[in-house]
Image (cartoon, grey):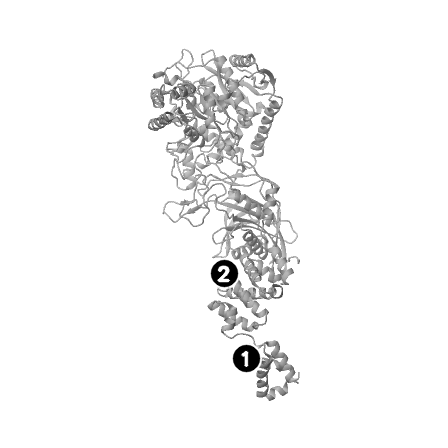
Amino acid sequence: MTDLTSLTLAEARKGLADKTFTSLELTDAHLSAIEKARVLNAFVMETPDQARAMAREADAKIGKGDAGPLAGIPLGIKDLFATKGVRTTACSKILGNFVPTYESTVTSQLWRDGAVMLGKLNNDEFAMGSANETSCFGPVGNPWRREGSNTTLVPGGSSGGSASAVAALLCMGATATDTGGSIRQPAAFTATVGIKPTYGRCSRWGIVAFASSLDQAGPIARSVRDSAMLLRSMAGHDPKDTTSVDIAVPDYEAAIGKSVKGMKIGIPKEYRLDGMPAEIEKLWTEGAAWLKAAGAELVEVSLPHTKYALPAYYIVAPAEASSNLARYDGVRYGLREQGKNIIELYENTRAEGFGAEVRRRVMIGTYVLSAGYYDAYYLRAQKVRTLIKKDFEDCFAKGVDAILTPATPSAAFGIGEKGGADPVEMYLNDIFTVTVNMAGLPGIAVPAGKDAQGLPLGLQLIGRPFEEETLFSLGEVIEQAAGRFTPARWW
Amino acid sequence: MSTATHKLLRGATGDWEMVIGMEIHAQVTSNSKLFSGASTTFGGEPNSHVSLVDAAMPGMLPVINEECVRQAVRTGLGLNAQINLRSVFDRKNYFYPDSPQGYQISQYKSPIVGEGEVVVELDGGRTATIGIERLHLEQDAGKLLHDQSPSMSFVDLNRCGVALMEIVSKPDIRDAEQAKAYVTKLRSILRYLGTCDGDMEKGNLRADVNVSVRKPGAPLGTRCEIKNMNSITFIGQAIEFEARRQIEILEEGGAIDQETRLYDPNKGETRSMRSKEEAHDYRYFPDPDLLPLEFSQAFVDELKAELPELPDQKKTRFVADFGLSAYDASVLVAERESALFYETVLDKLANRARDGKMAANWVINELFGRLNKEGRDITDSPVNAEQLAAIVDLIGEGTISGKIAKDLFEIVWQEGGDPRALVESRGMKQVTDLSAIEKVVDDIIAANPDKAAQVKDKPQSLGWFVGQVMKASGGKANPQSVNDLLKSKLGV
């Protein structure tokens, strides 16, 4: 039964329904895999007792024939999602041993549909990072290594734990969040599938906020179909989040295998960066050719404000973060470092509780919102955001169904290799993904090939608002053409 | 309408004019908080009305309470103000333990209500029109408790997140009298609308008062803000003190520092709280958790149609329908409960057109006078509207005289009961039977021949006879009949 962990979610669902194996067996297989993979540091909290209890409950329901769409499927949960009774820290020291009395809407919908929680997954502190190196629990290892090398690589971030765990077959799927690329970039670095749905598609209630106008939950999974299955449960209107949208959730899985014939795919010329590695360029061309072979029409499109997206993002996101993180003050929950007075208590708590990258972004955010700088930075960044959104709208107005881009400008890199001296070096990881958050659009990253060192690379498809189905159809074409990629086990 | 002349303050260098603007924080009457379902009930155990949102737990999101929006719109309509169909919630960022989010959700650049105006009544029938700059919705803060532990402060979040309306006046107020009249009028309008209970003792209505002084006609001076005033009397005192303080500084060649001050009612002075340099940079920006607040004109129109009659409209109606003086009418409408009492009396009267004005006099002079004397409120008046209406009916129909009515009022006040039944049982009925009165008149004239003889030369001594007759009849004789009879008998 050891290869139960290598099944896709869709295969496992069939096995459970056919009673080939039980959820408890499937869950135990994953729990045992997690135990053996602790060197990856993907999980920051394992919940085996809870997992087995949920698995037994799922087995009972499957037995009675009233199983939900995810009954018995073991999942990992990014530590940004509040889980009732289970420590939730956003991988920040400042939350300490915070145990929520509430369950996030997204995870409660997964449990409603029968899924099983294996534990909480590592991420960059407050989801601020692109390599999962800023977590207070330490960095996450990527199950992928360069051919012939023992160097541990980053899985990307901020959903590094989610991507690593899914790629290393520790869970059948994982929840993740994406503010500037935090689902799609780690998916690309680990040969997994990650979709950031349209802003408003998933409720943000109960997810530790980073930048409210950009944050969106989504799944990381082993296949396009699996990601469609997970998103269907995660998505939906929530009256507790007024930015969530009241549109019915379609059966995303039905989009898998649907013909893409006649679809118009935009290739944005602005995404062809100077000094872009040849293999990324090659991957992109190849991906376009696969879609064309499947009957799609390729058109060159222009998104003229792309080059302003990253700087504007690094104003808007820190601005919102500086305010969202003000609640971590040592007064009501989490870490408290005493001081002579309340100001010192704040200073000591926040200096001790926040890591360097979080402090940097809080400082940037505070600066750009300050009197005298607001107009020059925040207001201008919001105007840029409007222009970026309009770029996409113009493009879609010309009949383009989706836009194809590389997911990242490079493959995974070594822990500590990037951003040490210049944080911008790290920020550039999100160059292809931030535009999508700025415009609130859905974007999917699908594994498409490997670089010369044998590391996975991904392609990104960007869709119209609330047309995730198009992305699943197109993503599956790429997946079929490229094949699936599994790392060689070294842990 | 007479325009107001305002008070100037005399200094060593001549007259000074005060320029005053106010920010009133009015707690919105609603069952739950502005962005959470927690109760707004006053006086619960500390932290017993606190939701996850109020405590700013990780991942919590605000959801607007639509009733609070309706209350703000109603208030805007009551202030004759522009209602903005689109407004925006902003975050006002600052650290303090009474604000768990680390920011207050408020409205900064785009408030729900724009410009309006309020007409206020001043002494001697004068009025002044005070402009409203804006009204916006925002969250109230929690309360710090400093007396629970020797080394720590505790925080009670029950009030945290309760909806406030901040009503900002234009700097149109020119003296303490106008300032007090403005707060009084605003409070009255809010209470009529039912959008704020106006309870200043509980802090449900409090004012920040901006005061500056200038020579009449000169440009605006530097202002100081007196924070958190919750008594109309103190507002008046604080303004007088603050204006004189500023005048003294200016006349000595000094300059006013723009600062926030607090009023100490025990010492009768304002004290510096923080200077402009210490002022926070609130880093306002639109709250990304909330979409802009948008509603239709139809929504506004619907609320407008359901609006109750407001004090100004009521006053006009009382003057027109019952011939009340403008002053009496404004006394009656000043408090919603007083107006309601008077209107209930009107409803019960047998002849409203005839006795409406008399009823107003009775409510104002007898009832309010007595209530004031005993420090009681109209809502616990021992004489209810039905009883008062009965007394007025009895006078109006001529059953009792005004004088007897006062005795009757006293009995009802002390003992309660049905006035009409009391008049019967205690024999208080006015004697209108002419023969009975005539007998008394004859007796008195017979007993006082000297005085009777003098009346022709000294007509003013007729009053003495009237008094004697009334006394003899126990006040029950109809005074008009007594007068007529005496005149004919004495040949005056």
What chain letter is assigned to the residue under label 2?
B
Give, as a three-letter code, the residue at label 2: Asp
Q: Earlier in the sequence, mark 1 or mark 2?
A: 2
Q: Residue at x 39, y 39 (%)?
A: A339
**Residue A415 makes an appearance in the image:** no
Using the image as rendered, state which of residue A101 and residue A130 is in the foreground.
Answer: A101
Which mark is on residue B377?
A: 2
Q: Secondary structure at mark 1?
A: loop
Residue that extends furthest to the front in the rendered view of this protein: A64
Neighbours of disc 2 within 10 Å: few (<14), some (14-19), many (20+)? few
Q: Residue at x 38, y 18 (%)?
A: A5
Specify the quadrant of the image occupied by residue A309. top right
Q: Quadrant of the N terminus of chain A?
A: top left
Location of residue B130 with respect to A14 vertically, above or below: below
**Residue A104 makes an appearance in the image:** yes
Residue A91: give x, y in percent of width and height: 41, 29
Distance of label 1 from label 2 (alpha carbons): 36 Å
Which mark is on residue B473?
A: 1
Using the image as rendered, state which of residue B108 and residue A52 is in the foreground.
Answer: A52
Circles 1, 2 touching at the beta carbon (< 8 Å): no
Using the image as rendered, state which of residue A129 and residue B402 is in the foreground.
Answer: B402
What chain letter is assigned to the residue under label 1?
B
Q: Secondary structure at mark 2?
A: loop
Specify the quadrant of the image occupied by residue A400. top right
Neighbours of disc 1 within 10 Å: few (<14), some (14-19), many (20+)? some
Query: In screen coordinates, is B224 left or right of A414?
Result: right
Q: Quadrant of the C terminus of chain A?
A: top left
Q: Nearer the viewer, mark 1 or mark 2?
A: 1
